[in-house]
Image: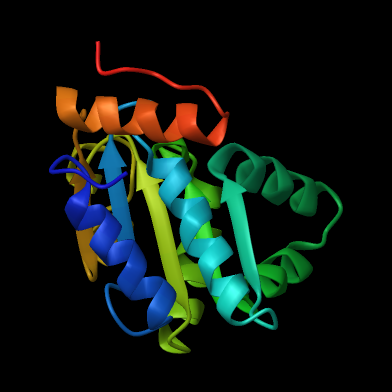
Amino acid sequence: IVGPSNSLAHAAALAIANNLGKDYNPLLIYGGTGLGKTHLLHCIGNEVLRKNPERRVRYETSDRFITEFISSIKQEKIHAFRQKYEKLDLLLLDDIQFFSNKEQTQEIFFHIFNALHEKQKHIVMSSDMVPQKIDGLQERIKSRLNWGLVVDIQAPKLETKMAILQKKSESLGISLDDD
């Protein structure tokens, strides 16, 4: 459901799904918990794959990215880790604020970001705040996150909440009146 609280993020998500690698690269969606950031990331990925099943799309939480990176260090497979991400057409990375104060993770992400961006591959991320307010995030990463579009999602107003509930109830076969 699109409303005033998420219309810009929704429009950017559609533009990316329809024109991968071109518009709003990178895209950073930020806002509070439970407002639909992760939902939009998944929608972008699903729509890209629906239109082009051969595209290489990966959704990753920052926690899993960090854990996998640490494992690659232990196993001396950093090059393979980096290659795995650099061959993508679309990287969807959730909750980048968790990269805060993780210097080696930020270093590898910086190189992956640059490689993808140079090849006009798309990067979409979410965060709970704007990059400038993420303490412990390197300035060069903050700068790159601002290369594209940074857009927020606000809490929906009553009418949008009602539309969400109505759509969900319809999908479940439940009839709800406006009261």
Give the residue displayed 21% in from the left and 64% down from the top. Answer: 149
User: Residue 121: image x %, image y %?
Assistant: 48, 81
Give the residue displayed 57% in from the left and 62% down from the top. Answer: 46
Q: Is residue 157 left or right of residue 16?
A: left
User: Residue 60: image x %, image y %?
Assistant: 60, 50
Give the residue displayed 54% in from the left and 43% down from the top. Answer: 62
Q: Please determine whether, in this image, residue 169 is positioned above or below residue 15.
A: above
- Tell which residue pokes out farthest to the right in this image: 75
Q: Is residue 153 left or right of residue 110?
A: left
Q: Is residue 46 left or right of residue 101?
A: right
Question: Can you tell which quarter of the image residue 21 is in?
Answer: bottom left
Q: Nearer the viewer, residue 96 or 161?
A: 161
User: Residue 64: image x %, image y %?
Assistant: 66, 42
Question: Can you tell which quarter of the image residue 175 is in?
Answer: top left
User: Residue 179: image x %, image y %?
Assistant: 24, 10
Q: Please determine whether, in this image, residue 97 is positioned above or below residue 88.
A: above
Q: Nearer the viewer, residue 32 or 68?
A: 32
Give the residue displayed 31% in from the left and 74% down from the top. Answer: 15
Image quadrant containing the N terminus: top left
Q: Nearer the viewer, residue 26 or 23?
A: 23
